[in-house]
Every structure is written in C-alpha cells, then in structure tokens.
Image (cartoon, helix red, strand yellow):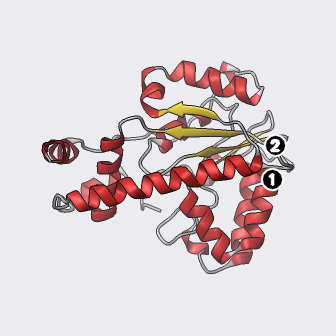
Amino acid sequence: MLLGVETGYEAEFDFPLYQPPPPRPYLLASVPRSGSTYVSHLLWQTGCLGAPLEYCNFEPGGPYGHANRSAAEQRELWRAALARRTSPNGVFGLKGFPVQFEALHASNPALLAEVMRTIFPSPGCGRVVLLHRRDRAAHAISYARAILSGVWRAEQERGGRAEPEYSRIAVERAEGMIASQERAWQAMLADLKIAPLELWYEDVLASPAATLDAVAGYLGVELDPAAAVRVPPIERQSQRGAREWSERYTQG
C-alpha cells in the first residue's frame, strides 16, 4: 500500500454489509499492465457491478501483502471482502491475474478452493469478464518498464525514480509472460466450460458507457444511476519514457 494514497482497499469505500454468498459473482480476468485498474474502477463506480479489486493478492508489496505468511488472515480478508465489497444488488467482482492464483495455490490451496467455489459454484456456472490489450507492443513495453523500475502507479513516479534503461530483452521477456498468462486463462475457461465476455482496453477507453452496458447485460443486472459511488481516481502514468522505448523497439 502507498502511504497517503487512496488505493480503494480502505474501509471508507466499503458497500453496506452483505450476507455472503453473493448471488452474482464474477471474475475480472486479465494480466498485468492491461488497463485492468482503470476498468475495475469504471465498473465499481456504477455501484451496481461490485468492486472488482485484487482481493487474492497477498504477495509482498500487494494490497494484502501484510498477510503474506498467514493463511488464517488471508481467509479473514477474503471473507471480509465478500461481505463488504458486494454491491447492494448482490454483485461481487474479483480482479485477478494468473500469477496471483498460482501463488495462492502454492501457499494457501484451501483458500484458493474456497475462492473458486464462490466464483464458480459448478462447472459451466460462473461469469468471467476477460480483458485484453490490443496493442501488444505497448503492453509488453509497459510491463517491462514496470518490472525494471518497480513503478506500477503514477503516484510512485513522484519519488524521482530513475528512468529504467531500455532493454529489448526485457520487452521480449514481458511479451512471453503476457502470452503465458493469457494461455493460462484460456485453459482455465476451457476446463470450467465458461464463455467469457471479452473486452479490449482500447475499446473501453473509446466507449466507457458501451462497456458498462455490455458488462451489466452479461451479468444480468440493471444499471441504476442513483446507485453510483465515489471511487479513488486513477491517475495515468507519464508516457514520455514509454514513447521513447516504443520508438527504439519498433526500429529493431
């Protein structure tokens, strides 16, 4: 968590208490640097589509990193999220990346099983919003730069961290990581017999309203303007360094 920065996990952003299990759970499935934070907050601010954040991210430096070594605390955090982050109409959203679920499988398989039962009560039963990024080169460059610099949010740029040195190898490695995680989602969806709603980040930016209508329709809920809630704003990171990397990458 970042000191003095509203990340969205604070209690002030909780919905009224809801008695689990939520009748309309869904997974916002993506990979790092795909625009998933922007999309999750876009869905959340409607007040009708849950608050799909990374409630299974217990890795050091993550939103629940303080519980990294405590299976009991992880279970408590998950159950608290179900109770406090289900919107009043019964929709609960969970945002996640394959690497997070792989880490949870290794450290706390019992909790992973509980999470899966919540989101997917039975084979073929469940909803997945699968987010992609169409510009693969920009995606890989963003991922590589974040890994090298440790800067994942705009607020971290204010510390005056040095610009990472350009590395084509790092970009190519990031491309491979993205492809591997996307294959993991496809394999999981095939196993569960789930037909996802597929979104493209660029299309979401072009038409947020159409995205909200599509997600609401997929989940079978109505959007009520009166239900809208305040969520933390998403500040876009500086694009100057990314543009320079893109120029060098495309030049070969």
* Residue 247 sits above or below residue 54 on the image: above
Q: Which residue is mark 2?
A: 124
* Residue 216 sits above or below residue 172 on the image: above
The residue sitting at 59% across, 46% down in the picture is: 29
Residue 216 in picture, x, y percent from top left: 69, 26
Classify 10 Å Cα crowding around label 1: few (below 14), some (14-19), many (20 and above): many
The residue sitting at 21% across, 57% down in the picture is: 168
Sequence-first disc among 1 and 2 = 1
| Left or right side of 125 for 252 | left
Q: Which residue is mark 1?
A: 118
Q: Which is more toward the observer, 43 or 32?
A: 32
Q: Amino acid at mark 2?
A: Gly
Q: Which is more toward the observer, 107 or 188?
A: 188
User: Residue 106 falls in which quadrant of the image?
Assistant: bottom right
Classify 10 Å Cα crowding around label 2: few (below 14), some (14-19), many (20 and above): some
* Residue 106 sits above or below residue 43 on the image: below
Q: Which is more toward the observer, 158 or 27?
A: 27
Residue 75 in picture, x, y percent from top left: 74, 68
Q: Amino acid at mark 1?
A: Thr
Q: Is residue 5 visible?
A: no
Residue 65 in picture, x, y percent from top left: 54, 70
Q: Which is more toward the observer, 193 or 155?
A: 193
